[in-house]
Amino acid sequence: MLAVFVTLNMALNLYWWIIIAAAVFSWLYAFNVINSSNRFVASIGDFLYRVTEPVFRPIRNLLPNLGGIDISPIIVLLAITFLQIFLRTSVAPMFGVFY
């Protein structure tokens, strides 16, 4: 059972960093710091968009329009943190797993 919790925690950590990368990439793209016509840069942007957009879209639909500010990554990061703490403190001890 420990393997399940450790694997889930690692997957949540990986998605955390993907969200951070997507946010930084969107800032760099918005301020024209990176060359958007470069194929490699475009493929990274497409990957980050495809991985994060299915999670961000429902949250954006629930939030009011804040102009140009998108706080959906912050909300997802808070949800991931809550889920990790919940798994570590509430679910894992019920199965006798302590990590």
Image (cartoon, helix red, strand yellow):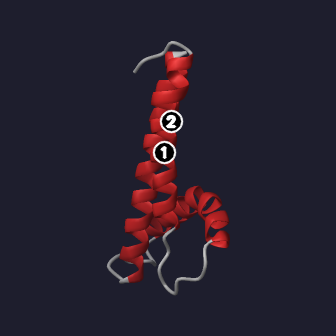
Badge 1 density bin: few <14, some 14–19, many ≥20, Cα 10 Å: few
Q: Is residue 54 above or below residue 4?
A: below
Taking the image as shown, residue 38 lies to the left or right of residue 61, namely left
Badge 2 density bin: few <14, some 14–19, many ≥20, Cα 10 Å: few
User: Mark 2 and 1 residues: CB-CB less than 8 Å, in contact?
Assistant: yes
Residue drawn at x 53%, y 66% as measured from the top left = 72
Q: Nearer the viewer, residue 22 or 47?
A: 22
Q: Is residue 22 above or below residue 17?
A: below
Residue 48 x/y as whole percent:
51, 60
Identify which amino acid the numbered label 1 is placed on.
Phe
Residue 32 x/y as whole percent:
36, 83
Q: Residue furthest top?
A: 96
- Which quarter of the figure is the N terminus placed in? top right
What secondary structure is found at the residue carrying circle 1? helix
Q: Residue furthest bottom?
A: 67
* Mark linked to residue 86: 2
Residue holding disc 1: 82
Residue drawn at x 61%, y 73% as measured from the top left = 63
Residue 87 x/y as whole percent:
51, 31
Does residue 7 appear anywhere in the picture?
no
What secondary structure is found at the residue carrying circle 2? helix
Residue 40 x/y as whole percent:
44, 64
